[in-house]
Image (cartoon, coloured by chain):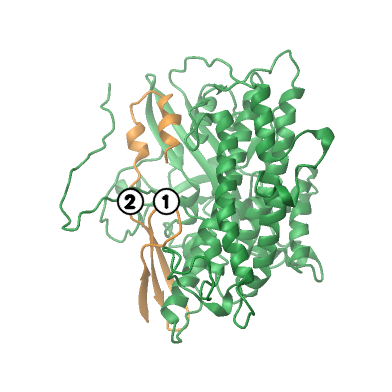
Amino acid sequence: MADFKVDPVTRIEGHLSVELTDTGSAISNAKCECQLFRGFELILKNRKPTDAPILAQRI
Amino acid sequence: MASVRSLDNAFGIDPNGYGYNTNARKGVILRNLVEGADLVMSHITHFYHLAALDYINTDYSDCPISGVPPWSPKDNDTATMVPTAGGTTGDTATTLILHYVQALNIRRKAHEMAALISGKQPCQPMLLPGGVTSVVTTALTSNFNTLIGDPDASIGDSWITAANSGKNILSFINYVYQPDILLVAPIISGFTKASSTQGGSGVAKYLAYGTFPNHSTGTLYISSGFLDATSGVVSPGWTLSTFNQGNIAEHIKYSYYDEGGGANTQLHPSVGVTKPQYGKSGAYTWAKAPRYNGNVAEVGPLARVLINYASAALHGNTNVTVWKDTVDYVMNALGLNNPSILANIPELRSVLGRHAARFIEAKVIATAMTGWLRDIHSQPLTGGTYTHTPIPSGANNSGYGLTEAPRGALGHWIRIAGRRIANYQCVVPTTWNVSPKDDSGVNGPIEKALIGTPIDTGASSAAINRLRVGRIIRSFDPCIACTVHIVTPDRKTIDKFEVSPLPER
């Protein structure tokens, strides 16, 4: 049983890390870790509804 | 797009959440053209600039990117790359690398095509509830036609030629992207189709919300549905059920969010809660775990292609036969047709399938866009000719907007109170694919695709294993919250910013 981690996963858009457990012959467990909080839900709260398309499309 | 559709829905324009507007049919078409151009741009970018390098051996003497970072040095596994081990020259690899450069120009043209309507790409300022701010002019349609490669219906396909593959989108798709995917796919299919033992298959359950509402009927050009394709046989075996956004719920047991004693998990997004709790015991990611009727589901081009294919193949839906025709073409070209194409369709539940699906979709949608552009001119002059319709000044409403981003099903849910946003929830495509375990401990699609992947133990095992993992993850085209990192050599803090919601009014 060994662990290895691919961090960062390159050539994707954004930041992702995967933590893998392997049995020596195959991957037995995988954890996808998104390391950044996005928070548009909180940014939009209490704003005018028409602000939503302008801000949310930046996701 | 999902956000503006959530307002359309909240203000009573489209009860189904797709922005279908009988009072502004030209606006519906213009939105579809922008969304279509963005999809084509994204798929070309993904194949050439993000994924193809995983399959091209750059360890040969006259490689044009030899020594060019970030591609060299990179993880190579020459036995599974173009040209394969024992291949004679680097000619094939060089062709693909040169197409990488050509594709940069074509993706720019696809952006430009969308920006003719949107004003700017990405992040389109022309979107507003009730339609778009853009207007249709002869210059717009003429310039759009030049970029996509469709001069006029009466002239036929004369602009779609191999010689024009550097000039317009349809020529590039037909004469560069198509041969390239058919060149790479057979080489990679040995280890990336579903029946191979190299991992990458995933959960084999697929979800699409659908998009591209027809301006005159509201019918979605990309259909919605939930497809259970866990069986190795399509018929009988696979089941396609009607999509209902009410069946979505987000689990947060393994995510950095406060469960509120259980009150905040497994909520429908219309009443979703975002309360960060970094470092929560047992949690390992900022992504939530969306589930459909309790099912884990993969979203994206493969989901859309299989759902549309199943709709045509299993239910005889003639609206989607163009999907079946294009899938059949690719399956024949890959030799996945013995004893029948239908018998081999389950092979697409794989890394190979995700790349093939992106090409299939780019071709189907780019071709459809030429028809949508012609529809603008065929609009009757009375009623429905506008690009925008005024909206009622909404006070206390809720709504949702659904679409298909290039990477998959995308939905936004809004609740308005006192003319302000009281609650807003985005469930984005990659959240489905990159999701952690749900409350029942079931892994997300990418996690499931990685589990079972064989580990190499030879001399170059570290690079080979990284490449295998990277190939599987990149086939999903993930898009995750990103930022700009500014780091000083001595790690000095330069400044701090805090983003907070506006206060209650």
Please tell me whether residue B101 is drawn above or below residue A53 in the rendered image.
below
The extreme front residue here reads: B62
Query: B196 and B95: which one is in front?
Result: B95
Chain A visual colour: orange
Quarter occupied by the C terminus of chain B: top left
In the figure, residue B441 lies in which quadrant? bottom left
Q: Return the x and y of residue B6 as percentages of the image width and height.
A: 51, 30
From the viewer's perspective, tell me whether residue B331 is left or right of residue B199: right
From the viewer's perspective, tell me whether residue B172 is left or right of residue B51: right
Compute the Cα span from label 1 to label 2: 8 Å
Q: Which element type, helix, strand or loop, lies under badge 1? A: loop
Residue receiving disc 1: B480
Please tell me whether residue B287 is drawn above or below residue B27 in the rendered image.
below
Q: Is residue B438 visible?
A: yes
In the figure, residue B185 lies in which quadrant? bottom right
Q: Residues within 10 Å of mark 1 (few under 14, many from 20)?
A: many
Residue receiving disc 2: A36
Q: Which element type, helix, strand or loop, lies under badge 2? A: loop
Residue type, numbered disc 2: Leu
Q: Residue at x 51, y 75 (%)?
A: B59
Q: Residue at x 42, y 68 (%)?
A: A30
Q: Return the x and y of residue B345 as percentages of the image width and height.
A: 72, 63
- Chain rendered green: B
Q: Write down the chain letter for disc 2.
A: A
Residue type, numbered disc 1: Ile
Q: Residues within 10 Å of mark 2 (few under 14, many from 20)?
A: some
Q: Do badges 1 and 2 share one subunit?
A: no
Q: Return the x and y of residue B158 as percentages of the image width and height.
A: 80, 42
Label count reads: 2
Please tell me whether residue B72 is drawn above or below residue A11 in the rendered image.
below
Please tell me whether residue B459 is drawn above or below residue B112 in the rendered image.
below
Q: Write down the chain letter for disc 1.
A: B
